[in-house]
Amino acid sequence: MDDELTLSVGGRQLSGWSQVRVTRGIERCPSDFEISMTERYPGEATAFVVQPGDACEVRLGADLVITGYVDRVAYGIGAAQHTIMVVGRSKCSDLVDCSAEWPGGQISGADALGIAQKLAAPYGISVSAPGEKGVRVEQFNLMIGETAFEIIERVCRYGALLAYDQPDGNLLLAQAAQVKAASGFTQGQNVQSATMTFSGDQRFAEYRCFMQSMDVLGDIGEGGNLLATATDPGVLRHRARYIVSEAPTGGQDFAQKRATWEANRRIGRSAQLLLVTDSWRDAAGALWTPNTLVPLVLPTLKCGSETDPLNWLISQVSYRRDFEGTTCELTIMRPEAFLPIPIMQLPTFADIPADLGGSVWGNEIRR
């Protein structure tokens, strides 16, 4: 399969790049690329017309991988050669760089998908959520100076969604581990090099979630302030982690989710595989893609076996080509590592029960 990188700008297709790096990830938004070439003939650089801000598309073979804009163009000269380097990012770079815009600064009665669509629309970006749409947020106030992506990422946490860009430059809201690759990685077959890191310094035997940071309810027993607990059976000595719940009025169900998330996420991130393979594609010819499950058979690294392969998630992939050849660098972790943190929605004035003696007048709570 011809995996030549092609940069399309202004109706022109530019290829022949000598060094290529394209990176995508589920915790990396926007996707980005850095490519360069050496001038083959005198005057070739003069004919090369690419400007910062140009709309562009990047393809690997026939597959579109990035739709976005050129950020920087650099020309260099040396004693024996001239070089040209182009750096760019996905369309979603505008969501990451630019401030959020919405008339009145307040969005009411929308789920995560609806809020993301409203904030992305001014930048010509569409948003899709093929599965869950996120929970309904009754009222959301934009803070001046926040970027659109900061807000989108925050509201996605309400519904346990990940937000990352797609090859067409638009934004996707999805949960982790939805697709499985046609093949994985097996020691002695398609692994050039790999490093497996196991860590225990960020794991704890017990997680306790409290209502408030000061234990003023000790006289009625620990249950007065302690809302929920979670444990990590993989930690064999006493290591405790205390958490203050974000729930404003107790919320034991939320506190339990918060404690369980803390344990699972730390377990998930305690093992990280950095792997280099010699192909950009799996056995079916599809590009290695973020948010894809892959089976691992790396017994020397204590990471799966022929009889019991591990199915872990690709979090980031970098397609590379340089003078040393073609490689693909992947970061792979347990799916639990990508569970978004649960966040409690703060109540609006309309949510305050009348039996608490509160009434709304303007922006004040009168009692």
Image: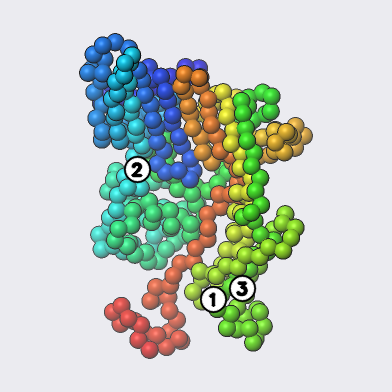
In the displayed structure, would residue 31 be above or below residue 247?
A: above
Task: Please tell me which residue is depicted at 32% across the width and 81% down the height of the picture.
Answer: 364
Identity of the amino acid at label 1?
Gln
Location of residue 275 by image quarter: top right
Q: Secondary structure at mark 3?
A: strand
Q: Secondary structure at mark 1?
A: loop
Q: CA distance from mark 2 to mark 3?
A: 40 Å
> In this figure, which residue is indicated by the disc labeled 2?
93
> In this figure, which residue is indicated by the disc labeled 3?
227
Other residues around mark 2 within 10 Å, as few (<14) / some (14–19) / many (≥20): many
Toward the viewer: 306 or 45?
Answer: 45
> In this figure, which residue is indicated by the disc labeled 1?
212
Instruction: Tell me residue 214's x, y (percent).
Output: 55, 78
Task: Please tell me which residue is depicted at 24% across the width and 30% down the height of the picture.
Answer: 51
Farthest residue in the front direction?
Answer: 79
Toward the viewer: 285 or 313?
Answer: 313
